[in-house]
Amino acid sequence: MRKITLLTLVLISICGCATKQINLEPSPFNYLEADQSLIELLIQKGSNAKKVHWVSFMVDCKSQQQVAEIISRAKIVGFDDDYIFYSEKRKLWSSSLSAYMKLNLSEISSFRAKLMPLIPSNSCETVGWGASVEM
């Protein structure tokens, strides 16, 4: 009986150690996958990827000042801005930053690369985008 109890305790501790490896760090958002999926969906819905689109990146942050600072720096690197608004439901300040570009991963990634260094990750949300007008 003692051997069975000892064996059971050893097996429980081994299983406990094997299942205890939990990664507490959140995995970074994969913008390339998300961008490619959205492009494919827009094309599937009838957008022509060869035409120039008016693409807007949505910026959501905890303070109005953060959004205003992002807008002022984004305008320098070629984005057009929109007004800043507050969402009572989400408790975030938001705006969109837009530019004309073709609907492909290369151009979306290029514009995102200009924008992302301007956005503080600790107080702003994931940056989404949408193509609202086809030119």
Image (spheres, grey):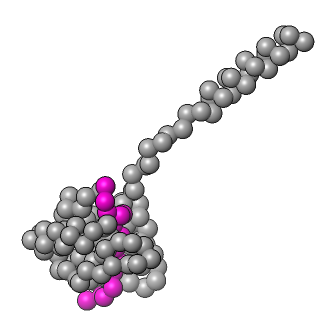
Residue 45 falls inside the magenta stretch: no
Q: Position of residue 72 (x, y in %)?
A: 13, 72
State the residue in front, 47 or 118: 118
Up/down of 118 relative to 42, above or below: above
State the residue in front, 111 or 9: 9
Q: Quadrant of the C terminus?
A: bottom left
Residue 13 seen in this snapshot: yes
Q: Residue at point 85% right, 15% down? A: 4
Left or right: residue 90 versus residue 62 is: right
Q: Position of residue 51 (x, y in %)?
A: 27, 83
State the residue in front, 112 or 22: 22
Q: Residue at point 39% right, 72% down? A: 91
Q: Magenta stretch?
A: 122-135
Q: Position of residue 80 (x, y in %)?
A: 17, 80
In which quadrant of the rendered view does residue 108 lie?
A: bottom left
Residue 131 falls inside the magenta stretch: yes
Q: Position of residue 133 (x, y in %)?
A: 30, 88
